[in-house]
Image (spheres, grey):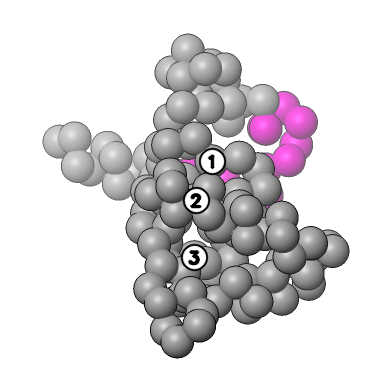
Amino acid sequence: MDISKTELEIMQVLWKSHPLCAQDVISELNKQKAWHEKTAKTLLNRLVKKQAISFTKEGKRYLYSPLIAEKDYQQKESASFISRLFKGRVSPLVAGFAKQETLSEQDVEELKAIIADWEKNRD
């Protein structure tokens, strides 16, 4: 499923809280930057067509909810990114962050824990 950068902003609002009507989505989006109502509604309709979100009708309002979990989307996109840029290898990505000194102590500790779990589960 191909979700654009602007569609992803809408998804992030819906992952945070759902179901939401279009006006609530727009209000949340406007906290970051100005959005036109028509643009947001067009993107909501595109996401419905892509089956990324669903809607239910409540009176005159449509309430939108995500059909895909944020974690599932992140895993799919991460795998695609690593495949495209690093030929499926994770270590060059992490090494790049380490060399630029953008990894925090917390990042390093989380990576160590992930590797330890991976090693434990492989035994």
The residue mark sitting in front, 2 or 3, is: 2
Using the numbered discs, state the Cα–Cα distance from disc 1 to disc 2 in whole angstroms.
Answer: 8 Å
Q: Residue at x 27, y 37 (%)?
A: 119
Using the numbered discs, state the Cα–Cα distance from disc 2 to disc 3 in whole angstroms.
Answer: 13 Å
Instruction: Give residue 15's mark.
Output: 3
The answer to whether any part of residue 10 appears in the image is yes
The residue tagged 1 is: 3
Q: Residue at x 61, y 40 (%)?
A: 4
Using the numbered discs, state the Cα–Cα distance from disc 1 to disc 3 in whole angstroms.
Answer: 14 Å
Does 91 sit above or below residue 104? above
| Residue placed most toward the observer, 122 or 25 | 25
Residue 104 belongs to magenta span: yes
Q: What stretch of residues is rendered in magenta?
A: 97-112
Helix, strand, or loop for circle 2? helix
The residue mark sitting in front, 1 or 2, is: 2
Label pair 1/2, CB-CB below 8 angstroms: yes
The residue tagged 2 is: 47
Which quadrant would the N terminus be assigned to in this image? top left
Is residue 31 rendered to the left or right of residue 57? Answer: right
Type of amino acid at the residue the image marks with label 1: Ile
